[in-house]
Structure formats: C-alpha cells, structure tokens
Amino acid sequence: LEALLDQLDIGVCSIIGFSLGGMINRRLAMDSPQRVRSLVILNSPHERSPDKQAEVEARAARVFAEGPMATMEDALTRWFSDDFRAQAPEIPAQVRAWRGRVDPFAYAHCCGILARGVVELMKLHDFLLRDFFVNNLSTCVCTEMETVNRSQKKSFPFSCKSARGDGPDKGQD
C-alpha cells in the first residue's frame, strides 16, 4: 500500500478498509503513521476468542485443501439471515458466483491472512496503535452493521467508537 501511495505521489491520506482491507490499512497506520490522516475500519477482524480463532483457522485450512467453494455455503449462512436468503435468493447466488471466479491460490492466501493476520496484529504493540489513534487521528471505527431488510427498506444503523471518546458511543471501549 505504501508503494502504491508513493507511485501515486500521495504523501498523507485518509484510508478506509473493509475486512482484509481494514487489516491492511491498520498495518499502514502502525508502520507509517505519518502517512495516515484518518482511518476507517469496517467489519475487520481484531482480537478473537481462542475458539473463534480456531474456527477461522480451520476454515482457512479447508480453503487451502479444497478450494474457494469449500466454505461458501457456511459463509452465506453467517453473512445472510435465513429470512434474507429466502427473500432475496439472487444476492447469495451472486456472491456464490463471485467466489466461483476468484483465483484459488490468491483466495486461499487471503483466507490465511484473515486467519493468522489477526494474531500478528495483536502481537504488535497495541498501545502504540491506541496512542496513534488518540494523538493523531479523528477516527471512527465502525464495529457492527445491521443486515438490510429489503422488504421493510430499513436504513443501515451502525455502532461507532471514536478512539478520542467523542463519537456516538462516547466513553465506551
């Protein structure tokens, strides 16, 4: 990411990352804090319980052994409620089709990063990252997002936490 910023002649930036992208931009903020003006992390893994970590590592191992579609149906069950899958079957079908087109080698390695990268990030000095957030950024880390209910046309409520303690969930860690 830093090489891309150099190539594009971008010195300081605001970055947003979803899932694996959140892990990547978090690492950029840790390694090169002078390059990051603001940081948004959406639905990105952080610290997991030992049981959850073992589950994620087992899924990654299954993808390595059996290919990208090995965990697809379980993923759709985690990502979409039963009601949503029944009401909008075209959405899971589209996600299934997208997964079917991924490069198996690259996807397996991304799964490995999602599984083991969290452990690596947690081994780094968490206090440095918190110090960076508190002293350098106006940051909102969105940690939860409700599933859209298409039939009721609900909005996208989410929960945010500001490292400075000035966000909607002020004072909550």
Image (cartoon, rainbow, N blue to C red):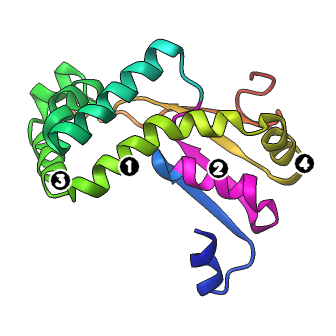
Query: Are the residues flagged by discs 4 and 3 in contact, CB closer than 8 Å?
Result: no
Q: Quadrant of the C terminus?
A: top right
Spatial distance from mark 4 to mark 1, Cα to Cα? 31 Å
Give, as a three-letter code, the residue at label 4. Asn
Give, as a three-letter code, the residue at label 3. Trp
Residue denoted by label 1:
110
Query: Are the residues flagged by discs 1 and 2 in contact, CB closer than 8 Å?
Result: no
Query: Are the residues flagged by discs 3 and 1 in contact, CB closer than 8 Å?
Result: no
Tell which circle, 4 or 3, labels the residue nearer the N-terminal end.
3
Tell which circle, 2 or 4, labels the residue nearer the N-terminal end.
2
- In this view, the residue farthest toward the right is 135
Tell which circle, 2 or 3, labels the residue nearer the N-terminal end.
2
**Dot 1: element:** helix
Residue denoted by label 3:
98
User: Residue at 66% across / 87% down in the picture?
Assistant: 9
Q: Quadrant of the N terminus?
A: bottom right
Spatial distance from mark 3 to mark 1, Cα to Cα? 15 Å
The correct choice, above or below, for 101 with respect to 154 in the image is below
Q: Residues within 10 Å of mark 3 (few under 14, many from 20)?
A: few
Give, as a three-letter code, the residue at label 1. Cys
Q: Which residues are magenta?
A: 22-46
Spatial distance from mark 4 to mark 3, Cα to Cα? 40 Å
Residue denoted by label 2:
26
Q: Quadrant of residue 16?
A: bottom right
Q: Residues within 10 Å of mark 4 (few under 14, many from 20)?
A: few
Tell which circle, 3 or 1, labels the residue nearer the N-terminal end.
3
Residue denoted by label 4:
135
User: Residue at 38% across / 27% down in the picture?
Assistant: 56
Nearest to the observer: residue 22 or residue 60 = 60
Nearest to the observer: residue 109 or residue 165 = 109
